[in-house]
Image: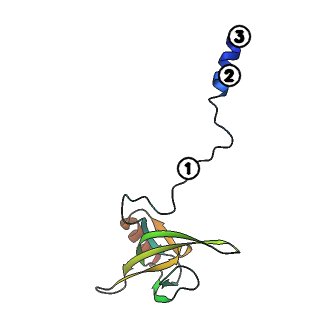
């Protein structure tokens, strides 16, 4: 075999295939911690539901600027589209903790609580 052909065949096999796709992280953060991040409600108000989707019952409502810890993400598929929902928890009173589902679109998501609190303060100015 000619040395040029040997060289070409070796390096042509090293190229990345056009069919390869990047690896995407799972919707819920790996088990390295018990939460995904922190969210700040970005709408005037939203309901915290007992289950994701339009069939959920309202547990309470949250106002713009409320900081929540996000525990889980879930994608709900319907015939028309898909929606991202998050299971979140936060304090709704002195010692009362609230935990429920809301649309991810109603939140701005941050990787730390301090960033979420800073964003919340800026929203409420």
* Vertical position of residue 18 compared to residue 9: above or below: below
SS under mark 2 = helix
Q: Nearer the viewer, mark 3 or mark 1?
A: 3
Could you tell me residue 120's position as x and y percent?
43, 74
| Mark identifier at residue 74 | none
Q: Say which of 103 and 32 sits in front.
A: 32
Q: Say which of 3 and 58 sits in front.
A: 3
Q: CA distance from mark 3 to mark 1?
A: 38 Å
Could you tell me residue 88's position as x and y percent?
43, 75
SS under mark 1 = loop
Model colouring: rainbow
Q: Earlier in the sequence, mark 3 or mark 2?
A: 3
Which residue lies under the disc numbered 2?
Answer: 9
Residue found farthest to the front: 1
Residue drawn where x is 46% and y is 74% of the image = 87
Residue drawn where x is 46% and y is 84% of the image = 62
Q: Earlier in the sequence, mark 3 or mark 1?
A: 3
Which residue lies under the disc numbered 1?
Answer: 23
* Vertical position of residue 93 compared to residue 16: above or below: below
Residue 122 location, quadrant:
bottom left
């Amino acid at each position: 075999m000619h040395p040029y052909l040997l060289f070409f065949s070796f390096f042509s096999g090293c190229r990345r295939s056009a069919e390869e796709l990047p690896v995407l992280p799972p919707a819920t953060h790996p088990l390295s911690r018990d939460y995904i991040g922190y969210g700040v409600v970005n709408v005037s108000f939203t309901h915290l539901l007992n289950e994701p989707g339009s069939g959920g019952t309202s547990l309470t409502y949250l106002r713009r600027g409320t900081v929540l810890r996000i525990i889980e993400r879930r994608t709900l598929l319907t015939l028309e589209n898909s929606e991202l929902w998050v299971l979140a928890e936060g304090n709704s009173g002195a010692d009362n903790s609230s935990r429920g589902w809301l649309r991810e679109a109603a939140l701005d998501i941050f990787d730390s609580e301090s960033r979420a609190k800073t964003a919340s303060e800026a929203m409420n100015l």
